[in-house]
Image (cartoon, rainbow, N blue to C red):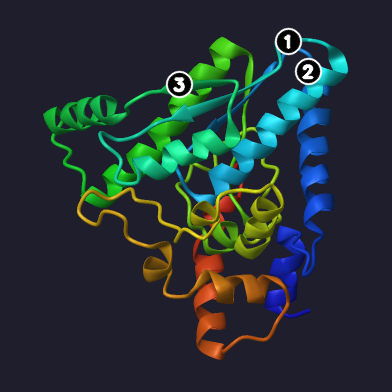
């Protein structure tokens, strides 16, 4: 079996999906988990303004509404968290996402003071972090906040990572991948867009160029410029298509280099 086929099998990506069927599968997946864990009453997603959190948030809102209708229990809710670092460049898009999802509840929590205090504490111990490391601290701080809200609200932290990010390791270890459940992990970027189209998402949101936007010195840097390969090519690879050798090497090297991010901690 080729490396490509092995990766596709491990990530569970299918070359063709039916959007309405996939939407139902994701909702059923979330609904079944919640109903099997009766102490959990809320679904929690950090809304960044990008495609993946937009899709995940919408799926969670639909799930919460379905459970309320079926069980007649009003405590089931979707909570959207806005977790900007200061003022976010694409805040207008974030508000458009909130308008599209229409969450049951929204919390706005600025993570910048916490990051600055953490950095100040490190400096007192003689540790100075780079802008890149600070970016990872932002991702981990956001996850910490989500779990604090989840603890108070009997919540389930829902991940937004997709297969295209998973294969490249384009996420922060114990940050945006440190969630309880992930309904879109087997979808690539193109498939995620198809689901958003089916859900009548505003076009400018699902066609938006993906960017993590974690580094202060490189604001709004697009993911593809960092990865060295486009998401369209990554999607094609994940769907089993033959791509150019250079891109294949980049993708497979990224996959191997970031294996530690996808594995459980090493034990003796």
Q: Residues within 10 Å of mark 3 (few under 14, many from 20)?
A: few
Residue 106's label in the rendered image is none
Labels 2 and 3: the sequence-earlier one: 2
Name the residue tied to disc 2: 68
Residue 258, position as x, y percentages in the image: 51, 60
Mark 1–mark 2 Cα distance, whole angstroms, equals 6 Å
Q: Residue 225 or 192: which is nearer the viewer? A: 192
**Up/down of 37 relative to 187, above or below:** above
CB-based contact (under 8 Å), mark 1 and mark 2: yes
- Looking at the rendered structure, the number of numbered marks drawn on it comes to 3
- 3 vs 25, left or right, is left
Q: Where is residue 215 in the image (x, y as percent from the top left)?
A: 27, 50
Category of crowding for the residue at label 1, using alpha-carbon neighbours closer than 10 angstroms: few (below 14), some (14–19), many (at least 20): few
Image point (68%, 70%), residue name = 238
Q: Above or below — where is 206 with respect to 15?
A: above
Asked if residue 175 shows in the view, the reply is no
For disc 1, the marked residue is 74
C-alpha gap between disc 3 and disc 1: 19 Å
Q: Mark 3 points at which residue?
A: 107
Mark closer to the chain start, 3 or 1: 1
User: Quadrant location of residue 224?
Assistant: bottom left
Residue 225 appears in the picture as rendered:
yes
Nearer-N-terminus badge (1/2): 2
Q: What element carries label 1?
A: loop
């Amino acid at each position: 079996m080729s490396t490509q086929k092995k990766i596709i099998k491990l990530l569970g990506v299918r070359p063709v999906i039916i959007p309405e069927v996939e939407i139902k599968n994701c909702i059923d997946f979330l609904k079944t988990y919640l109903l099997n864990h009766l102490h959990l009453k809320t679904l929690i997603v950090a809304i960044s303004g990008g495609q993946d959190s937009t899709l995940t948030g919408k799926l969670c809102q639909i799930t919460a509404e379905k459970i309320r209708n079926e069980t007649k229990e009003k405590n089931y809710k979707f909570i959207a968290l806005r977790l900007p670092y200061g003022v976010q460049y694409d805040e207008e898009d974030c508000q458009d996402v909130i308008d599209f999802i229409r969450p049951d509840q929204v919390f706005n929590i600025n993570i910048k003071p916490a990051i600055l205090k953490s950095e100040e504490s490190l400096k007192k111990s003689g540790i100075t972090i780079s802008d890149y490391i600070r970016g990872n601290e932002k991702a981990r701080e956001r996850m910490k906040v989500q779990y604090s809200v989840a603890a108070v609200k009997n919540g389930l932290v829902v991940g937004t990572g997709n297969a295209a990010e998973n294969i490249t390791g384009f996420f922060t270890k114990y940050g945006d991948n440190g969630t309880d459940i992930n309904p879109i992990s087997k979808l690539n970027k193109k498939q995620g867009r198809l689901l958003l189209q089916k859900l009548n998402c505003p076009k400018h949101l699902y066609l938006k160029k993906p960017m993590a936007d974690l580094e202060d010195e490189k604001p709004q840097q697009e993911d593809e410029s960092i990865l060295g390969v486009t998401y369209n090519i990554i999607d094609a690879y994940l769907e089993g298509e033959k791509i150019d050798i250079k891109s294949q090497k980049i993708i497979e090297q990224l996959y191997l280099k970031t294996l530690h991010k996808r594995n459980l901690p090493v034990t003796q």
